[in-house]
Image (cartoon, grey):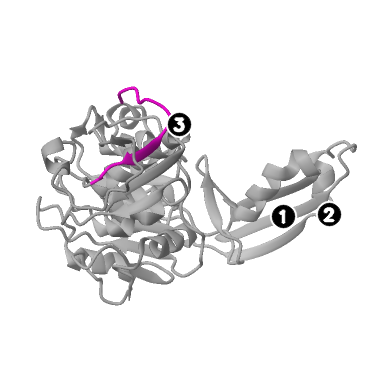
Amino acid sequence: MNEIPEGGVVLFGPWIGEFGWELMTWQAWCRRESKKFKKSYACSFPDMKPLYEDFAEFIPHSHEGRALDWHRKDNTDKVQFDMPPDITIQILPPKQYRTEGDFIQFGFPIDSYAYLLHARGIARGGKNYPPSKWMEVAKSLTGTVASIGTMFDYHIPGTADMRDVPLNVLMDIMAGCDCVIGQSSGVMHLACLCGARTVVWGDSRSYFGETLRERYTNTWNPFKTNVTFIFDDKWTPDPNDIIRAANVEERMTKEPEQLVSIENLFVSREIRNKLTQAVGCGKYMITISTLINGKLYHYYSRHEFPNTDMIPSLMHMMNDIKMKEFNAKEKTGPQLVNTEDSLETGVDQWT
C-alpha cells in the first residue's frame, strides 16, 4: 500500500467490501498502521466491531450489502456514517491481495459444538452445496453439530441453529469447536483466524496467481491453522470425502482443556501455555499420544524444576508418566496422501 504520513488522528475506511478480504487484508493492515497515529477510528458494517475494537474506536456505517468494487472512491463516498470531528487523515481501503499486517487470534474458546457447518446460501454463482448432501454430512458426524452463517444460509435439519449470532459469539464457538466445514467463503477464513481446524472446498482455478488451497493453507492463513482443502470444479464434492476429511483428526481428550493447532500438530491449550512459559519459570510438560488397535492412548507427565536444575532426560521423565485411554476410531477406507504429482499440481489424491 502507499506510504502513509504518521501522526494525528486517522479514520480507516469505510470498508464495504467482502468479508474474507476484510479479515485477511484490511483489518490486520489497519491494526499495524494504527501504531503510527495518536488515535484511530475504523468504519465498517455494524456487526464488525469485534475485528477492530482492540486498536480503534469503531464507527458503524449504513451501507447495504458487501460490494465487489469496494475500492472505488465513487462507491465509498456514498456511504453514510458519523464522521468524528477530530480526524486529520482518512485512509480508504484499496484492493490489494497481499498485505503486511498484524493479526490476532479471535475468540475465547467455549466447548459448545464439535462441528460447525457453513451451508452457504448466496444467490449468485450457483456454487452452493446441495442441502441433501449437507444432510448426509451432518448425519455422519459424531458429536454436537450446528449450522452457522447468516439467515440467507441454510439451516441443516437436525443441527443447532447458530446462524446470525453476534460475531463475537461465533468467534468463541469457532475457537472451541473440533472442526468447521464449508465451501470457500469469508466465514471459513474467519475459522482460520479463530484457530479452528477447517475442511473447505472449491474449484481448481487460479485466483490472483494461486489456487484456493494455496490461499487457505498459506497466503491467508497467518497462524498456520490446520486446513484440509478439497478440489471440486463443480463445488459439489462427495459427502464421503468431506466426512473422511473431517474425521482425520479426532479430539485427543474430552477434558475441558481446548485443542489448538500449532504447525499442523494438535496439542492442548494447557500444554501450549506451559511450553511457552517453560524457559521463564522452569515448568515442563511432556505428552505422547499414539493409536494402538483402535484405542487412542494419551500419556502425559507434569514437572516443575528450579531454573538452576538440568532438564532431565526423556526416559527419566517417562519413569513416572501417567496414562489415560480414550476411545478412538480406526482410520479405515481411503486415505489422503501426498505424492509428487499432488504436490506439483496442488490436487489432493486418495488411495
Q: Pick whichever of labels 2 and 1 is earlier in the sequence.
A: 1
Residue most extreme to the bottom = 158
Residue tagged by mark 2?
A: 320
Q: Residue at x 24, y 62 (%)?
A: 119
Residue 71 placed where, x, y %?
18, 36
Q: Is residue 73 visible?
A: yes
Looking at the image, residue 287 sits to the left or right of residue 233; the answer is: right
Task: Please name the amino acid that badge 2 sits on.
Answer: Asp
The CA distance from mark 2 to mark 3 is 52 Å
Task: Locate the N terminus and report the quarter of the image it occupies.
Answer: top left
> Could you say which is closer to the camera, residue 278 or residue 3?
3
Q: Residue at x 49, y 58 (%)?
A: 250
The mark found on residue 300 in the picture is 1
Q: What's drawn in magenta, residue-wise? A: 1-15
- Does residue 123 show up magenta in the picture? no
* Label 3: which secondary element: helix
The CA distance from mark 2 to mark 1 is 10 Å
Task: Please name the amino acid that badge 1 sits on.
Answer: Tyr
